[in-house]
Amino acid sequence: MNALSLDSETELTPTDELTTDLVKRNPTIFMALVAILTALTAVVTAVLVIPFPSTFGYLNLGDTLVMTSGIILGPIGGFIAGGVGSAFGDILVGYSYYAPITFLVKGGEGLVVGWFARYAKHTAKLNLADVVGLILGAIIMLYGYLVSETYFYGFEFALAEMIWVNLFQVTVGGIVAITIAPTIRKYLHQTL
């Protein structure tokens, strides 16, 4: 059986599909939520921009919406909102050369968070599946930018950005996501 046990009383199994059951119940609402969260991800990415000169990257708060989108929308919605929204955010603030890398890295982050969020079903409680997804999504983000920036700028600069920018960014994103996303997930399931 493909299950994730939290304790002796609780067993969570993933949904059969790669998406949440929101897609089955109301695909129009699902598409609207993907569009809204994609736009919000772009805006939140572009609102606070603190440049990191050595790699031409920047600190932003977009990971809050990437991770939240994964928890709420599942892997496909998380990939689209995270990848497309973050890439648009890069373009909006003049970092268009990062957009293709961001699309893959942040899309992968949202996909992994969403993949594990499938185990949580519709609960408003933070659970092991959410935490594992957030941690693995954070690792994808950190490693993805470390590898790409090492290629372009060298390991020392890429490591400095990972420590001083990306680690902070993904930590804040994870804290915000675990604070709000499970409640939103439960609310959407109950009302839609």
Image (cartoon, helix red, strand yellow):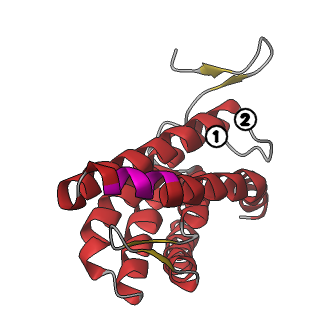
On-image quarter of the C terminus? bottom right
**Circle 2: element type:** loop
Estimate the x, y position of residue 44 in percent, counting from the top left.
Answer: 57, 78
Quadrant housing residue 65: bottom right
Query: What is the three-letter code of the residue carrying label 1?
Result: Asp
Estimate the x, y position of residue 55 in percent, counting from the top left.
Answer: 32, 67
Residue 181 as seen in the image, left or right of residue 115? right
Residue 73 visible in image: no
What residue sits right under mark 1 in the picture?
Answer: 130
- Considering only vertical position in the picture, is 19 above or below 95? above
Count neighbours of disc 1 (C-alpha within 10 A) and say few if under 14, some if 14 to 19, many if 20 or more. Answer: many
Q: Which residue is more in the foreground, 34 or 48?
A: 48
Quadrant housing residue 99: bottom left
- Residue at the left extreme of this rendering: 151
Estimate the x, y position of residue 36 in percent, counting from the top left.
Answer: 56, 78
Q: Which residue is more in the foreground, 27 or 39?
A: 39
Residue at left 54%, top 72%? 60
Query: What is the three-letter code of the residue carrying label 2?
Result: Asn
Q: Let me know if residue 150 is in the magenta part.
A: no
- Considering only vertical position in the picture, is 53 above or below 150? below
Estimate the x, y position of residue 172 in percent, counting from the top left.
Answer: 65, 58
Mark 2 and mark 1 in contact? Answer it, CB < 8 Å: yes
Residue at left 58%, top 81%? 48
**Circle 1: element type:** helix
Q: Give the range drawn in magenta.
A: 157-163
Q: Residue 67 carries which label?
A: none
Count neighbours of disc 2 (C-alpha within 10 A) and say few if under 14, some if 14 to 19, many if 20 or more. Answer: some
What residue sits right under mark 2 in the picture?
Answer: 127
- Considering only vertical position in the picture, is 107 above or below 32? above
Alpha carbon separation for disc pair 2 and 1: 5 Å
Residue 141 as seen in the image, left or right of residue 169? left
Residue 83 visible in image: yes
